[in-house]
């Protein structure tokens, strides 16, 4: 069974259930503005029982996806008109922004439910969506029609047409039989064959979508295994560079970092992470997943410092390793204001402690 957290990780999976807005009312009644179509940011926050700034932060991180789902921002004359015609009759006292107002459709609110991590209401909506999807998949379906069945049916029609014409034809000339056969085939070609083609096209499209979903499920199972396995240092030691980098990126997001992206991490090269802390500082991270028994040297720190400060203009620089740092490496890191996340600090961070450099 797919866990509700899968919707947080997969935009493809979110898109597949984007129209199931009835899930919102199944979990909790969603109040709408007087136009019957939209809700404000405050109303979205009230529905999911979170602070308004949490929704604002989510909007910043996923603006493109939410805009495709129906979120829009009113400004200028559009905002003035909406205030006059809609919000003027709204019973709730709503402080009006001076320059813009974000509006969400029900579809956009459902999209928020599939992105919002720290909300019990959002989790219940995701669970409902996946439960109904699973029930639909498990419902009995008619057997698919494949290419072999299609061609067999056409051959059967040909035989029946030929037999029928032969039995009904009284003309001795072969030409009369050929004309009759052509007439019957023409009728079938204009009726039965197009219908069968539509059936085949629908079946092929369904098969393509099932293949896509299967590939997505494989990816999600791997992501969920990584989530489950990341509770111990042994699990971190078993990760390759790319997996280690993705896991460190998740820890950064957990501590409030935004726009977090992972670069590198192919082969034996270290993975890099770029992003911003919750208060807007530029974050640069290098992740080194090395074999137990090795260590981070002062040369490793110096190379990272030059890259982070000169190339990326980092405000916060983290060098994260699954192995210890040498004494000289720790001294160089302290001198250049690089946070050395050595094995002991990484274990505490991985087990839920917040990293002070990100606060």
Image: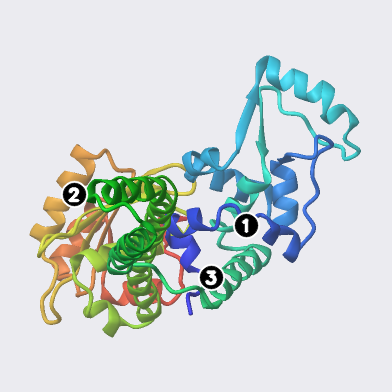
Task: Please tell me which residue lies in front, 266 or 339.
Answer: 266
* Element assignment for label 1: loop
Give the residue at x 38% y 70%. 217
Q: Say left or right for 168 vs 148.
A: right
Q: Say left or right for 248 vs 240.
A: right
Q: Position of residue 270 (x, y in %)?
A: 16, 60
Q: Which residue is mark 2?
A: 305
Measure the C-alpha gap from mark 1 to mark 3. Answer: 15 Å
Observer able to see residue 202: yes
Count neighbours of disc 2 (C-alpha within 10 A) and say few if under 14, some if 14 to 19, many if 20 or more. many
- Which numbered marker is on residue 4? 3
Q: Position of residue 214 (x, y in %)?
A: 35, 69
* Element assignment for label 3: loop
Give the residue at x 25% y 57%. 334
Going from N to C along the chain, the mark reached first, 1 or 2, is 1
Tell me which corner region of the image, top left, top right, bottom left or bottom right, holds residue 210: bottom left
Count neighbours of disc 1 (C-alpha within 10 A) and say few if under 14, some if 14 to 19, many if 20 or more. some
Q: Which residue is mark 1?
A: 20
Callout 3–callout 2 Cβ contact below 8 Å: no
Residue 45 higher or lower than 328, as above or below: above
Discs 3/2, front: 3
| Count of numbered marks | 3
Applied colour scheme: rainbow
Callout 1–callout 2 Cβ contact below 8 Å: no
Q: Say left or right for 344 vs 228.
A: left
Discs 1/3, front: 1
Going from N to C along the chain, the mark reached first, 3 or 2, is 3
Discs 1/2, front: 1
The extreme top residue here reads 77
Task: Please tell me which residue lies in front, 117 or 111.
Answer: 111
Q: Position of residue 320 (x, y in %)?
A: 26, 64
């Amino acid at each position: 069974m797919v866990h509700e957290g899968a919707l947080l990780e997969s935009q493809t999976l979110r898109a597949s259930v984007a129209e199931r807005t009835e899930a919102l009312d199944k979990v909790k009644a969603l109040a709408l503005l007087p136009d019957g179509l939209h809700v404000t940011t405050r109303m979205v926050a009230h529905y999911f029982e979170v602070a308004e700034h949490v929704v604002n932060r989510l909007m910043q991180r996923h603006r493109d996806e939410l805009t495709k789902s129906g979120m829009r921002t009113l400004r200028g004359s559009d905002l003035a008109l909406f205030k006059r015609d809609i919000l003027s009759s709204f019973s709730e006292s709503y402080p009006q922004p001076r320059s813009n107002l974000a509006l969400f459709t029900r579809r956009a609110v459902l999209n928020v439910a599939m992105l919002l991590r720290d909300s019990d209401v959002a989790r219940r909506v995701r669970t409902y969506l996946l439960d109904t999807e699973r029930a639909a998949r498990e419902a009995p379906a008619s057997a698919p029609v494949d290419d072999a069945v299609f061609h067999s049916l056409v051959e059967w029609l040909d035989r029946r047409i030929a037999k029928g014409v032969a039995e009904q034809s009284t003309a001795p000339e072969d030409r009369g039989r050929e004309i009759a056969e052509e007439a019957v085939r023409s009728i079938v070609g204009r009726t039965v064959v197009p219908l069968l083609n539509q059936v085949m096209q629908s079946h092929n499209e369904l098969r393509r979508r099932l293949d896509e979903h299967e590939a997505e499920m494989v990816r999600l199972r791997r992501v969920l295994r990584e989530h489950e396995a990341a509770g111990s240092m042994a699990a971190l030691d078993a990760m390759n560079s790319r997996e280690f980098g993705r896991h460190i990126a998740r820890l950064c997001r957990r501590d409030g970092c935004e726009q977090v992206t992972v670069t590198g991490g192919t082969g034996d090269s270290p993975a890099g992470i770029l992003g911003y802390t919750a208060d807007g500082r530029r974050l640069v991270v290098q992740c080194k997943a090395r074999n137990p028994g090795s260590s981070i040297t002062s040369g490793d720190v110096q190379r990272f410092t030059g890259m982070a400060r000169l190339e990326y203009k980092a405000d916060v620089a983290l060098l994260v390793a699954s192995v210890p740092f040498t004494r000289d490496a720790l001294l160089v890191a302290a001198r250049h204001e690089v946070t050395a996340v050595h094995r002991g600090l990484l274990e505490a961070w991985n087990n839920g402690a917040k990293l002070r450099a990100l606060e």
